[in-house]
Image (spheres, helix red, strand yellow):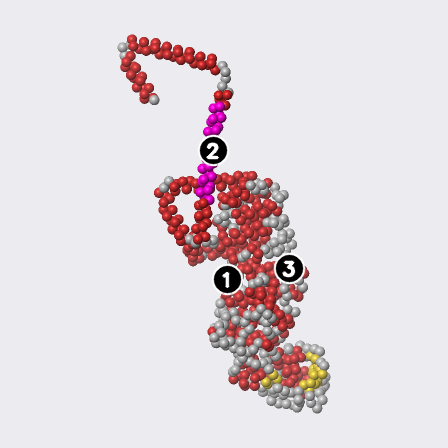
């Protein structure tokens, strides 16, 4: 007998689940089972045989006719004069439910429990056991037990909904699923401080106990009830009923973070291959799968199993169909808020969706959801195998689409005035805290790491690599070291590239954004085109010259740099220790480069002096031996010049204005000199 947690008047009114008919047409002590046949323990021989599957019931017409409208119609509307046998293979609940209904017709007390009430209610509706035939008939009694006992209990509602899985569409038409779902939703949304009923909670590391083994004890008043107390209980439901419960919970106003966490918990139980090994959800899902199957989960098409690595064609058809249904249903009920579920969970769900060929519209919707939180992704989650007919190992086109969705989302959010002012404020605060990277910068680093990983694939085309590398704007990368590593890795894996293709590949990189280590590596990299190496060296020389010039101006005490120094000191005092250490390292590198440049200048001057000395020695050695003739010629010319000057002086002394002319000439020469 089912011990309900509800101690209401309704529970006592129905004698704790025992119901019986007020009339007894045939006195009997009960039913006897002989193999697959049921017989009434009475002296009156049976006159009516009912066949349900492999089970047969040898009964009497009168008790059935007095309480079942369907039996009345079958017997009296039959063309045969005396119908003594019928087949009821389509009765909901099967032979078990009909056995209880037949006992009720004979006036035998029936024990109503949470495990049999749903099947008995549907069987009573099928047999048309209404109040028109007898007051207090089976429909009335089962409906009252559902309304007053089951729906007031947390665990009763869970178990009834679980047992409705084999009663479609009767349980849907009789609103059993809807009422149980709403009852569960109301209790799940209750304040945890007011919960006084039993729940399963998170399973222990050992095998979880079955429902029948759990004591019906309410939580202690001093025990703190966690906000996710209802996850484990609702996760035993089949996916369609789970969707009904989650939909009702969302209508009641549950927080979207809890709804998303419930979805991830359910996925960890029914899709164990979806959750990473070692994570909390994964442990729970692995340990509790056996218990869920033991409580009825295995009745649903054999249950769900872990998807092993391999081709999608290797997965059994029924199993893949079940998993596809679970994934499609989970995608459809994910809350629309951005951080309702983790990006890692969405990417793993997307991986399985592509493998199982989920509906394209749902896959597109899932890709948009990933694009909303693409900056939270990790490299292992992005390495999704290509399940299409392409030759590439990883699905690069999928990552390209995810990046496009991310950029569209960023552009949409950035265009809104409220978000723009909010982002400007946080960018300013981020610069004050040490230039915290924004979403685009994180995505740029992620894409560079992804390109480095997939570039080892020899089937990856240059166009796909270039398109993915150039998808982000230039402002997203403050340093192109990651992009340089990806380019170098691609060149290693594709040694047959032509010179034109190598130049085209290196065009996606900005040489001015490379660090010193990257420039030193690029200068010695034989795989790079010569023109790229020259650009790297030139850009590094320009950066060193600018740094030295700036440092020189600071040391000279330029007034324009005095405020900058004070501001920098203030910034360093307010920044974390890691930033100060980074700045000290950079300053040390600049001083080292300056010292090396001064050494180069000193060596240059020494070489210049040595060159001048060698040049003079070379001139002496190369002097011609007939240089004496030239010397005598110059001496003769000098003597002639002196004689001409003496003659001129004598002539000038004879002239009257000779002194004045001499003075004027002297003044003209002085002015020229």
- Closer to the camera in the image, 179 or 154: 154
* Distance from Cα at disc 1 to Cα at disc 3: 29 Å
Q: Residue at x 57, y 81 (%)?
A: 3
Q: Which residues are magenta?
A: 589-617
In the image, residue 306 sits, relative to residue 606, either above or below, namely below
Determine whether the residue tagged by mark 3 lies in a helix, strand or loop.
loop
Tell me which corner region of the image, top left, top right, bottom left or bottom right, holds residue 232: bottom right
Count of marks overlaid on the render: 3
Position in image of residue 507 (x %, y %) = 54, 44
Residue indicated by mark 1: 339
Disc with the residue nearer the chain's start (2 vs 1): 1
User: What is the crowding at mark 2: few (fewer than 14 residues within 10 Å), some, or many (at least 20)?
Assistant: few
Of labels 3 and 2, earlier in sequence is: 3
Q: Which one is earlier in the sequence, the residue at label 1 or at label 3?
A: 3
* Mark 3–mark 2 distance (CA, rounded to whole Å): 65 Å
Tell me residue 311's x, y (percent): 66, 58
């Amino acid at each position: 007998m089912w011990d309900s947690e509800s101690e209401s008047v309704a529970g006592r009114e129905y004698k704790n689940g025992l119901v019986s008919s007020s009339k007894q047409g045939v006195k009997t002590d009960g039913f006897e089972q002989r193999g697959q046949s049921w017989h009434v323990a009475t002296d009156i021989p049976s006159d009516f045989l009912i066949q349900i599957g492999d089970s047969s019931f040898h009964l009497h017409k009168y008790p059935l006719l007095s309480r079942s409208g369907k039996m009345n119609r079958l017997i009296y509307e039959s063309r045969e004069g005396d119908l003594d046998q019928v087949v009821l293979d389509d009765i909901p609940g099967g032979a078990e439910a009909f056995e209880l209904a037949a006992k009720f017709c004979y006036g035998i007390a029936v024990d109503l429990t949470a495990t049999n009430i749903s099947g008995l209610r549907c069987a009573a509706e099928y047999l048309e056991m209404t109040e028109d035939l007898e007051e207090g008939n089976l429909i009335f009694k089962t409906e009252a037990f559902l309304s007053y006992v089951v729906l007031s209990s947390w665990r009763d509602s869970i178990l009834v909904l679980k047992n409705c899985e084999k009663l479609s569409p009767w349980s849907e038409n009789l609103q059993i699923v809807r009422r149980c779902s709403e009852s569960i939703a109301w209790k799940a949304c209750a304040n945890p401080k007011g919960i006084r009923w039993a729940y399963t909670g998170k399973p222990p590391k050992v095998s979880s106990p079955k429902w029948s083994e759990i004591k019906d004890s309410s939580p202690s008043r001093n025990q703190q009830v966690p906000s996710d107390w209802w996850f484990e209980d609702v996760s035993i439901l089949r996916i369609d009923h789970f969707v009904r419960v989650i939909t009702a919970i969302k209508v009641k106003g549950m927080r979207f973070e809890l709804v998303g966490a419930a979805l991830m918990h359910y996925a960890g139980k029914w899709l164990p291959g979806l959750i990473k090994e070692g994570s909390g959800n994964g442990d729970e899902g692995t340990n509790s799968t056996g218990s869920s199957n033991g409580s009825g989960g295995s009745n649903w098409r054999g249950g769900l199993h872990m998807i092993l690595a391999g081709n999608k064609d290797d997965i059994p058809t029924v199993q893949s169909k079940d998993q596809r249904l679970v994934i499609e249903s989970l995608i459809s009920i994910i809350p629309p808020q951005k951080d309702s579920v983790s990006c890692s969970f969405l990417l793993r769900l997307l991986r399985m969706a592509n493998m199982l060929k989920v509906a394209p519209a749902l896959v597109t919707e899932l890709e948009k959801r990933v694009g909303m939180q693409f900056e939270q992704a990790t490299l292992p989650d992005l390495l999704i195998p290509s399940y299409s007919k392409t030759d590439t190992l990883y699905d690069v086109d999928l990552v390209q689409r995810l990046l496009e969705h991310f950029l569209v989302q960023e552009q949409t959010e950035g265009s809104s005035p409220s978000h723009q002012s909010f982002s400007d404020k946080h960018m300013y605060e981020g610069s004050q805290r040490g230039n915290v990277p924004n979403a685009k910068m994180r995505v740029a680093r992620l894409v560079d790491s992804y390109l480095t990983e997939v570039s080892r694939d020899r089937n990856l085309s240059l166009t796909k690599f270039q398109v993915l590398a150039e998808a982000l704007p230039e402002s997203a990368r403050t340093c192109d070291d990651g992009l340089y590593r990806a380019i170098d890795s691609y060149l290693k894996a594709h040694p047959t590239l032509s010179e034109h293709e190598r130049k085209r590949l290196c065009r996606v990189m900005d040489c001015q954004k490379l660090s010193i280590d990257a420039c030193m590596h690029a200068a010695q990299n034989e795989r790079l085109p010569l023109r790229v190496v020259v650009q790297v060296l030139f850009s590094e020389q320009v950066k060193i010259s600018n740094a030295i010039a700036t440092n020189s101006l600071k040391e000279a005490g330029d007034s324009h740099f005095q405020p900058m120094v004070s501001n920098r000191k203030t910034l360093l005092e307010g920044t974390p220790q890691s930033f100060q250490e980074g700045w000290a390292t950079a300053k040390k590198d600049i001083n080292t480069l300056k010292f090396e440049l001064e050494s180069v200048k000193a060596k240059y001057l020494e070489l210049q002096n040595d060159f001048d000395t060698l040049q003079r020695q070379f001139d002496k050695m190369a002097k011609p031996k007939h240089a004496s003739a030239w010397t005598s010629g110059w001496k003769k010319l000098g003597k002639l010049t002196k004689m001409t000057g003496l003659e001129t002086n004598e002539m000038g002394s004879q002239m009257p204005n000779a002194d004045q002319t001499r003075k004027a000439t002297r003044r003209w020469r002085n002015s020229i000199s």
